[in-house]
Amino acid sequence: MIHFFYSPAMKNAMNKILLIFIFYVVAAASFNGLFVVNAFMDSHDPRRSFQAMYDDTAYKPFIYRQLMMETAKKIREILPEETQTILTQEFKNIDLIKRQYARAKIEERFVIEYHILYFMCFGCIFLSMFLWRQIGIEITGSKYVGTITACAFAIIFPMFEWLWVYYDCGEILFCSAAVLLAIRGNWLVIILISPIAAYNKESFLFFVLTLYPFLILKMEKKKAAATVIFSAILCGVVYLYTSSIYASNIGGNTEWHFYEHLNDFFILDSWKLPYPFYGVWWYVGFFIPNTFMLAWLAKCTWKKLPEHWKNHIKFALIFNVPLFVLFCQPNEIRNFSLLYVGFIAMLSIFIKEEINIEQKK
């Protein structure tokens, strides 16, 4: 019996359990950093608040991003009435969310859906951490670097996601999974998940095109191109479908922010928006130190990135910069979400180089 606890199989199993525990704790801290800002936009932005999304009255284009809300509704629908009554009462008695987050506004009619979405968002971050770890391993060949990278990005993530919305958690999960699938040449799975990811957020239409540099590692260029183009078409069909359903909602298919960007660029206050992340004050958005650190990370790691990763990031920049300048709200790094996976790649190389420097001392 004693030998069993020291066996390689037992050691391997316990290491995996410990990794899961560490990721669970870090994901919890990360999600807390997100949710404490404005919950589900309950009191910050009525155009895309939980209540508006639940009632299908949210403004366009936010109302198009239905996957996670519809999933929460469907889960409640399949629950027996008795179970729904018990859960509603239990959630009200425990009051887990409202006791911790003053900005959460939970009505009794959607208390179950609210909690389901709450745990779904946490689950997206938790599962994404395993994908980020694998991305780090793919690039550096080191499990240690992969693990540190996943934890580091999870902690940084809320700083990028100021004014986050719940579908952002689904977006990073889909994008991370899509990159790993492309690296392995799993073109069929990419095609299958693309419309689902687009139903979560239409930006996946552009992200799927950035997978081409990975796919050509495992298949012919024509097949890789056909994969990303067909996937993008499916995403476009989903977008047209959802936009037709919610055609009567207030707002436009896009929001025009070009002149706001020009205006804010010359206003110093727009470069320093304070917010207490993790209980400590820092500045969000394109605060000069934030921008400098991102630029320095790129400078330190770009030459060491594999060529297919460089091309992926170039594609993401080509799509993301015009989209940000024309259609996204100013000063939100979260609107550069097409570059998140590329940032994870650069972060993993930076961490590896730091470890190598330390080992040489």
Image: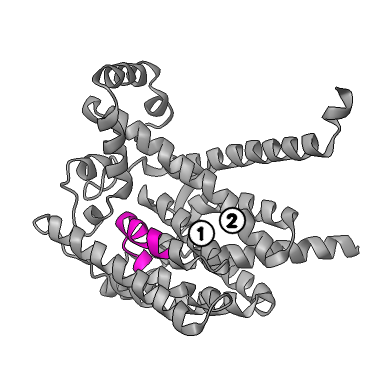
State the residue at coordinates (68%, 60%): 137
| Residue sitting nearer the eye, 301 or 82 | 82
Residue 331 is inside the magenta segment: no
Residue on which the image places disc 1: 176
What's drawn in magenta, residue-wise?
190-205
- Can residue 105 be seen in the rendering of this structure? no
- Give residue 8's position: percent from left, percent from top: 83, 39
Q: Is residue 60 above or below residue 209?
A: above
- Give residue 170's position: percent from left, percent from top: 41, 51
| Secondary element type, mark 1 | helix
Upstream in sequence: badge 2 or badge 1: 2
Q: Quadrant of residue 142?
A: bottom right
- The kind of secondary structure the magenta stretch mainly shows is helix
Residue on which the image places disc 2: 132
In the shown orientation, is residue 232 left or right of residue 14? left
The mark found on residue 339 in the picture is none
State the residue at coordinates (24%, 20%): 81
Q: CA distance from mark 2 to mark 1?
A: 7 Å
State the residue at coordinates (51%, 65%): 186
